[in-house]
Image (cartoon, helix red, strand yellow):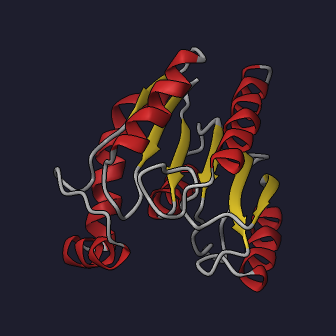
Amino acid sequence: MNIVLLHSSYGLRPAVHAAADRLRAAGHEVRVPDLYDGQTTDSGDEGREITERIGHEELLRRAVAAAAPYSEDGLVYAGFSLGGAIAQNLALGDEKARGLLLLHGTSDLPEDAHTDGLPVQLHVADPDPAESDDWLNTWYLGMQRAGADVEIHRYAGAGHLYTDPGLDDWDEAAAERTWRTALAFLDSLDER
């Protein structure tokens, strides 16, 4: 699979590169655009400030520009938290998208969202203050209505960005389960 992996509001941290390397080791081509132009942080508040300073529209524009040269052959869009939200927007706007892998984040759905059976896998903490149960139920129903083939995996007791060993949210067991499940999901896309 050809994958575009988008970072969280913490920026293009070592954990994102490590995730890309794990996916490459499984035989996938992975691109990790830097939507923050080199800025990284260990603080959620600072990450939100960087996001606000750049602006959501500009981040989306940067992500589209990074993915566009590779989208003709069909991409899997993937992302962490904020990057997942951006990846969702890109995948729903790309009729050739092969799949959507969301780690720790989703996005609002436009009322007219439509996809023809797009495979979607979401991994989130349980509970996750950024992805409440009510929100996830609404999101799931919206994705189903849009025609996506959705599966959600919840990880009890894990922190929001539990796949990043450099953050307090880190949960090694949950992260390993996530990557095993995500790699199987990506393998299944090869069969479609």
Which residue: 83% across, 63% down? 144
Which residue: 45% across, 38% down? 4
Q: Is 154 in front, or is 42? A: 42
Residue 120's x, y, as percent? 72, 49
Looking at the image, residue 168 lies above or below residue 151: below
Residue 43's x, y, as percent? 32, 71
Q: In the figure, residue 88 lies in which quadrant?
A: bottom right
Pick the quarter of the image with the C terminus: top right
Looking at the image, residue 180 lies above or below residue 56: above
Q: In the figure, residue 45 lies in which quadrant?
A: bottom left
Q: In the figure, residue 54 lies in which quadrant?
A: bottom left
Q: Is 114 in front, or is 50? A: 50
Which residue: 73% across, 33% down? 180
Which residue: 79% across, 68% down? 140
Looking at the image, residue 53 lies above or below residue 37: below
Pick the quarter of the image with the N terminus: top right
Residue 87's x, y, as percent? 50, 53
* Observer able to see residue 59: yes
* Observer able to see residue 115: no
Task: Report the side of 36 relative to 162 (left or right).
Answer: left
Residue 169's x, y, as percent? 54, 63
Q: Is 132 in front, or is 68? A: 132
Task: Report the side of 154 relative to 107 (left or right).
Answer: right
